[in-house]
Image (cartoon, rainbow, N blue to C red):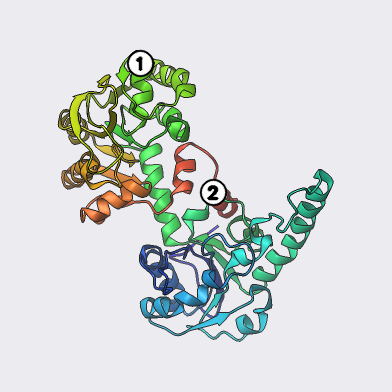
Amino acid sequence: MQNISNYDFAGKKAIVRVDFNVPLNENFEITDDTRIRAALPTLKKVLEKGGSLIIMSHLGRPKGVQEKYSLKHIIAHVEKKLGTKIQFADDCMKAKAQADALKPGEVLLLENLRFYAEEEGKPRGLAEDATEEEKKAAKKAVKESQKEFVKTLASYADCYINDAFGTAHRAHASTALIAEYFPNDKMFGYVMEGEIKAISKVLETPERPLTAIIGGSKVSSKIGIIEHVLDLVDNLIIGGGMVYTFKKAMGGKIGRSLCEDDQIEVALNVMKAAEEKGVKLYLSKAVVAADDFSNDANTVICPSDNIPDGYEGVDAAPEAVAEFKEVIMNSKTILWNGPVGVFEMPNFAKGTNAIAGFLKEATDNGAFTLVGGGDSVAAVTQMGYADKVSYVSTGGGAMLEYLEGKVLPGIAAIQE
């Protein structure tokens, strides 16, 4: 494994896996270029050190070649940000001549990797009534052709850089398999380095007290994280729709709030484990409850275990937010993943936005703060605090699996 900061790129071609899976409007204009901007330091490093670039990425979830998912739509924007002209290969498997012709400082962008079934290693076009034998045969065929796919991509370059943390949890051709062709010339890009360093700082070498704020609607989707961090944290704040499953487990009255009855036992086990491990568990004491799942619904503030019939909890109430603030401000390391209310509705985003402000304040006071997860990231971004906290993860699903303690294929392939 090499280090991008001191690797000699002079005269070499670097094939770089980035995450340019950016949102486009109906006119194919990029509406959020965060991921592109995040990759620029890595791309510029190669060029500044005398190398040439072969950039590869996916865009969306196409089933075969689909015009609207072509990476050609983002070329002009990337050129502007990178400050150089970009060549385009409209077929990943027929770009050898273009790659070979690259001179130092030149850039080639490959077409959407997911136009090819071999990238994900999953067969396509199977009939709904396909037999098990047909499914097995199709899967075997894709796996066989995947070897040639990876070999071809690898043949374009002298070194490999993985800078796509958002896909690091996928064992895809471009994130995991290609690395074996570069046993002595593979490395992380700066996005990957930053993500790994930030998460490791929280999970492995935190300054204490360490507090995790885990929000979201369902216990079932976050239980892996909750169980893993229980062995690491001093304080655990659970917010959002998950609270009501816990409150019902304790015999509370939750109105028609979201509740996963099949997770009642899980909630009880979490509370028991927290007590046994000496972790202070915080659940919203008071909530804003609404008589309809609508931004303009009638609301009341009530205890989270005594919600009136016909009402559902939609946000953490001021009393709960005040308690969260006290915990956060007395912590030295804070991890935040998930909202504590129905964040997509402005009237019920107050608790989540307040936490964003607390993390900014805690960071100002010297705490290390890591934010990850769509709504959490959206909150700090909307509040103007994205650069006021210690680190904002771009990972999504990759971060979730990392926080659960899982080995991510895209990371393991570089470290091996």
Of the numbered discs in the image, which one, if any, rests on residue 116? none
Residue 210 lies in quadrant: top left
Q: Position of residue 374 (x, y in %)?
A: 37, 49
Badge 1 is on which residue? Answer: 275
Query: Which residue corresponds to the image point at 58% horizontal and 62% vertical from the top-left?
Result: 62
Query: Which residue corresponds to the image point at 45% horizontal and 42% vertical from the top-left?
Result: 400
Q: Is residue 164 above or below residue 30?
A: above
Mark 2 or mark 1: which comes first in sequence?
2
Amino acid type at circle 2 is His
Amino acid type at circle 1 is Glu
Disc 2 to disc 1, C-alpha distance: 32 Å
Q: Position of residue 271 (x, y in %)?
A: 38, 18
Residue 9 visible in image: no
Query: Which residue corresponds to the image point at 65% horizontal and 57% vertical from the top-left?
Result: 177
Q: Is residue 231 left or right of residue 316?
A: right
Badge 2 is on which residue? Answer: 169
Residue 307 lies in quadrant: top left
SS type, badge 1: helix
Q: Position of residue 77 (x, y in %)?
A: 40, 77
**Label 2: few (<14), some or many (≥20) within 10 Å?**
many
Residue 202 visible in image: yes
Quadrant of the drawing holding the N terminus: bottom right
